[in-house]
Amino acid sequence: MAMQDFENVKNFDSLIIEGTAKIGKMTFLAYLITSLYKTKAVLFTPQESYLFQRRLKLIIKQFPELENFLTPYYLKEDWHHLKQKYGFKFLLIELERLITASDAQVIVLHRIGEFFEFQDRYEIDNFYKSLVKLAVAHEKIIVFIANSNNDNFEFINNIADDFTDVVISIALNEKSERLLTINSLLHNKQYPPMNFKIHENNFILEYFNTSSESQANKIKNVLIAELEFADTNTKMICEYLFHQPKYFNVKTANSLQTMLQEIFISPEIVIVFMKRTQENFETLRTIKKQLPNSTIITIIDQPFIRAEDKREAYSYGSDELFANDLVLDTFILSLEKASRDNFYTKRLEKLPKMQNVIEDLSDLRNFAEACLENSVYFTLFIFEAKDTIVQVASSGRKLDYICQQEDLLYYLAINTTPIHAKNIIESYQRQNLDFTLNSSFESIKPTALRESLL
């Protein structure tokens, strides 16, 4: 039995149970309520009552105690009319009444994605914020059950991840065994996969014996594609960030035809460099239909993006949208979310612990070598600086490292592209520091970097 990890679930305020249809999400919920929480729960579902009651009776046969714990609630038959008239306000009012009036400790939202129609996607963010805030204020545990076959799943899941402590994923492996993975978003920790099954009304949970074949299945496919727009530097950065063959298999496509061919490798992450045209948006829609469970990140040929740009991209299937002058920190966070693994944060943790002010240039060189070995992206700026290193250090950022040798100041900025050198220079100039950019070197050009540090 592997119950130690599961006991920790009780300590979180919100969690998601996700998986395809008929994978066992409701069965697993029955186990949580009757064996882990052992407390009253209310369930809110958009499914029609007679359909859900039929299913619930089957689950109660396996878990008779569930009938004493769980009370289901259903949407009114005219909920479409109410939503058109009052928006999502009426739903939040009903849920607030349910949460405040009930003595249940656990609030379950079953297949909540089905409540949101395509044009409602922009409402989801505020809805989740309000709901989680309400549950926490009344010291309730809130459980989302998400069907990954639903058209809104990826969009809802990305938003829910921002307000949820734990994601519990259920999936079938090649042997048709149900594997369960617990991913603590709060602690950036993923527990080893566990196998679960039901035997004589007992829920059996045990660690899955991971074979070498299963390890190979953990490799995620990443597709980097171009649709009439290519930002060579950003594309190279993407390839550099995913340069980890044990975990990522990266494919590239520089044409529509090649991209459609590569889709058949079923990439979990698709990064599309795209010129903003109606035809390209339709291509995004095609990709999403082919890969409903994959994350599509779009980089568009604009220097900035507006709310309406995001709305349009989301409506065609994009999960994230970035301008071509993207902020690397934010972009990396999106990649980690898409891969469901803080793979880049783990690389940063492997770097030597250094003070932001480095006295010896050889120490800075060793630090840069460690960044290259771990595929941590950085840019080294070399400034002609008249001001002292103390003045610069007092204005630096957390992931900036500086070393001064006579009139040259070496400035190593992690997660910073050369295009943002101007921003760094201007920030110092506003503080009346005398800086002149001598040269800059990206981490994806290690030869030039090493020469600059000799």
Image: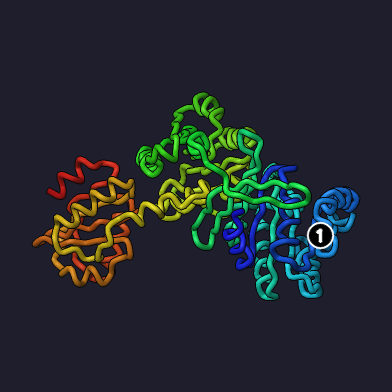
Q: Amino acid at mark 1?
A: Leu
**Residue 278 shows up from this direction:** no
**Residue 11 shows up from this direction:** yes
- On the image, the x and y values in percent for residue 247 come to 44, 40
**Which residue is pictured at 61% across the width and 66% down the height?**
12
**Which residue is pictured at 62% across the width and 44% down the height?**
179
Question: What colouring style does the render use?
Answer: rainbow
The answer to whether 268 is drawn above or below residue 123 in the figure is above
Query: Within 10 angstroms of label 1, few (less than 14), some, or many (20 or more) residues?
Result: many
Report which quarter residue 99 is drawn in. Answer: bottom right
> Of helix, strand and loop, which one carries label 1?
helix
**Which residue is pictured at 50% across the width and 62% down the height?**
187
**Which residue is pictured at 67% across the width and 57% down the height?**
124
- On the image, the x and y values in percent for residue 106 come to 73, 66
Q: Which residue is mark 1?
A: 66
Counting the numbered discs, the total is 1
The answer to whether 294 is drawn above or below residue 142 in the figure is above
* Left or right of 262, for residue 233: left
- On the image, the x and y values in percent for residue 201 come to 78, 51
- On the image, the x and y values in percent for residue 249 come to 45, 35
* Left or right of 437, for residue 67: right
Query: Is 78 in front, or is 136?
Result: 136
